[in-house]
Image (spheres, rainbow, N blue to C red):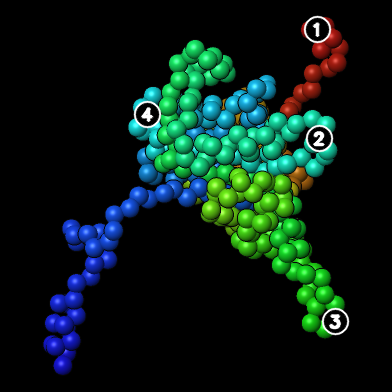
Amino acid sequence: TTTTTTSSSSSKKDVNNISKPDFGRHVEDCELDKSNIVMIGPTGSGKTLLVKTLAKLIDVPLVVTDATCLTQAGYVGEDVESILFKLYIESGQDIERCQRGIVYIDETDKIRKSGGNVSISRDVSGEGVQHALLKIVEGNIVNVPKEPGRKNPRGDFLQIDTSNILFICGGAFAGLEKIINKRMDNASIGFGAQMKKDTDDHKVQGKYFDSAIPKDLVHYGMIPEFVGRFPVIVSTQGLDENDLIDILTEPKNSLLKQYKYLFAMNDVDFHISDCGLLEIAKTAFGRGTGARGLRAITENTLMETMFVVPSIPDVHTVYLDAAAVRGDRKPILLKDPNMTIEKFEELLKETGGRPEDVDGADFVQIDEEIPSEEIGEAA
């Protein structure tokens, strides 16, 4: 019975197996259309990095542009055709390669329709930009001037077919979660009433963004014609503390590795404790600025250290912990050549967490302040 079953299953032909050379011969030939994408998510959640990584993996030209600098045709600012000219330059002035590229338009939520009285003046940097993008986003042959910034009727034009150019629009879309909340959770009273959700929580906000539909974007201020040309709506989740710690340490060009490189230029090691990493992640998470907030915290914490260390020849290690990140005290400089990180941490435990009681360890400090009289004489 087993032999019969095996032989009968092997005799069946799997037409969907892509490893066979005759795949696709049994379906009707057709042209594949692109699916433009709207990417929504809080700031610092990796939207731009995701698109850059995608373009690098599939080896296509990529242009990252900002929607806030675009204006309607005829007004001061960049026309939408300038996006395609940038893609043409990025592709090495190869039209064929340009027509298979990716265009990422960041800050798309900033070009929503104005809430004011638009009858007084035209919304040239908002709704007008959406109207101007309609033609190139859907897929047409667009005349792009070779001299960006000037539209000379007698000038030379490049004809670029946008049918196979993938357009991705991204933005934070702050306040969209409230629109989705109003649609999904209608007001009710009684024992079966739904509890009010905290839309400021990044987990709740992420769930609402996952449930976004085109109607929500229209209520937000995007015109229906623009939303209809982006059939795929995806969202990125806000980063939690563990994600921020991974961003600090794991990537090839992580922030921690950059500081180690900077201190190594002065022949100094840099070490940050686990509690220090956690404190940086907690502070960045509390500020709500995502991964971008990590550099601001580390820069403020290590600013004096990076200026002081080159002038002290006997320092071999900079030690950063949670107390230094919080601002309770300065980072620690290890000067004793026999003092290792492991030995210092053991001595720190023995002294009850008091670095000033450990020999060979000092705080970062500027020894002398320049008197105001000297400043006046130098001026």
- Mark whose residue sits in front, 4 or 1: 4
Q: Residues within 10 Å of mark 2 (few under 14, many from 20)?
A: few
Circle 4 sits in a helix, a strand or a loop, which is it?
helix
- Residue 351, horizontal then vertical, whole percent: 70, 54
Residue type beneath disc 2 = Ser
Q: Nearer the viewer, mark 1 or mark 3?
A: 3
Tag 3: residue type? Gly
**Please, is residue 136 above or below residue 324 in the view?**
above
In the drawing, what numbered circle is on residue 379? 1
Question: Which of the two labelled residues, at mark 4 and mark 1, occupies the earlier sequence position?
Answer: 4
Give the Cα separation between the discs numbered 1 and 3.
Answer: 74 Å
Element marked by disc 2? loop
Image location (x, y in percent) of residue 84: 49, 30
User: In the displayed structure, would residue 190 be above or below residue 58?
Assistant: below
Which of marks 3 and 4 precedes in the sequence?
4
Residues at marks 4 and 2, CA–CA distance in whole angstroms: 41 Å
